[in-house]
Image (cartoon, coloured by chain):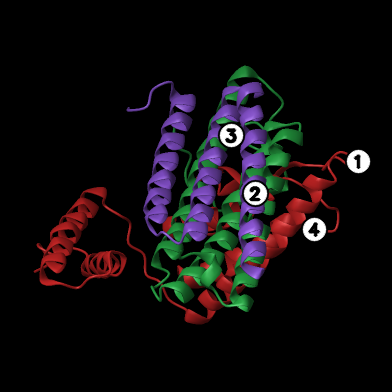
Amino acid sequence: MRYWFPFPLLTLGLLVMWIVMTRSASTANLLLGILLSVPAAWAMVNLEPLKSRVRGPGAMVRLAGNVVTDLTLSNMKVARSILRSLRRPPRSGFATVHLTLKDENGLALLACILTATPGTAWLSFDRRSGTLLLHILDLDDSEDWPTIIRDRYEKPLLEIFR
Amino acid sequence: MTGIADLPVWAAIIVCLLVLAGSLFSLIGAIGMVRLPEFYQRLHAPGLATSGAVILVCLGSGLCFALLEGRWIVHEVLIIIFTVLTTPITLMLLGKASLYRDRTEGNDVPAKTVPGPSIADAAANRLPELPTE
Amino acid sequence: MTALFLVWSIQFAQILLGAAMLLILYRIIKGPRAQDRILGLDVLYVNAMLMLITFGIRTGDSIYFEISLAVALLGFVSTIALAKFLMRGEVIE
């Protein structure tokens, strides 16, 4: 069983997605979906994804809330600083943050969050010392970026990927 | 003719506002691509198109088709998830590539080990020194 | 009357997206270095995808969504390959 279905959730999810996208649940379509989703899971085995335990639903909700509000606010902020960039060019610069987060999947999620919010760009991460190099579009004096990243994102991530 | 004309007025107004706001965000991002002087500053401009614009336009079209045809908005949600997951990877790779190129050409970017207070507390729990590549 | 206004506003959104694509094209042509051009190409793909979605809303045809998903996939893969090429000088190691 484990041999045929190495990632049962992934296979099931792909099958459901296929049926919903093609909008028909006939037997032929179901068979075609199974024919596509089962080999997709075998391909996933060859990729050898790192597995990490995920816990703490409260932290997940908190993180999602932070991401949604920051996505909205940072879109507005970057739009404003682009529109007035002729009069007042944005003072941008590099910033380094030291992270205690070690889990690979957690780091990947953090990278996705930081790059998806405009205004911060993830440039490189040194795994040995745990230092992250960021580029920030508008460096306000009022904003302490290392503290923001640690408090808003890294703390819930540390709780989720313990 | 099907299309936006068959929508109820309130929904049509919401759809139009969402689509207009999304395309405005995309235009502002493009203006940023032209105006901002440095490459690393321009790296932030696509974020407006890929997070703001894609989410707004897809929400608009999702609302439109959910009311018009009663179909689920799977396609739009898929597009949102896909762009939100993939653009970080492209932007990160591009940023890394340009950092690498700037370093090999000796331009003014941070060096590989960054000096600063963060290194000091990093040294405390560092692993044994590995041979560097 | 409202229908006409709504079709117009979708058309106006398309004009905005077209202007954005022209500005990005300028950056691709002028872009001082290779990474600027690749970044421009990536944003151009995203804007093309958004343009296809607005066409889908205007005509009420869901075939546009399949096309826009395909465009998004192509844009992602091509940008990754180009960025890899910038970093190493070869796409497949």
Q: Name the residue under label 4.
A: A143
- Asked if badges 3 and 1 are on one and the same chain, I answer no
Residue at 62 percent of width and 41 percent of height: C18
Amino acid type shown at disc 3: Gly
Distance Cα–Cα, label 1 vs label 2: 21 Å
- Across and down, in percent, residue B31 comes to 73, 40
| Mark linked to residue B25 | none
Tell which tag, 3 or 2, sits nearer the viewer.
2
- Amino acid type shown at disc 1: Arg
Please give the name of the residue rendered at 74% of the width and 52% of the height, measured from the top-left corner.
Answer: A78
Q: Marks 4 and 2: CB-CB under 8 Å?
A: no
Crowding near the residue tagged with mark 4, few <14, some 14–19, many ≥20 C-alpha atoms within 10 Å: few
User: Disc 4 is attached to a residue of which chain?
Assistant: A
Q: Which chain is red?
A: A
Q: Could you tell me which secondary element the residue under label 4 belongs to?
A: loop
Residue B26 — which label?
Answer: 2
Q: Residue C40 carries which label?
A: 3
Amino acid of disc 2: Ser
Q: Which amino acid does label 4 sit on?
A: Glu
Residues packed near mark 1 inside 10 Å, few (<14), some (14 to 19) or many (20 plus): few
> Pointer 2 indicates a residue of which chain?
B
In purple, which chain?
Answer: C
Q: Is residue B70 left or right of residue A9?
A: right
Q: Is residue C49 above or below residue B34?
A: below
Residue B47: percent from the left, percent from the top? 62, 49
Whether residue C75 appears in this view of the structure is yes
Place of residue A67 in the rendered image (x, y in percent of width and height, measured from the top left): 60, 66
| Whether labels 4 and 1 share one chain | yes
Residue at the image position 57 percent from the left and 78 percent from the top: B8
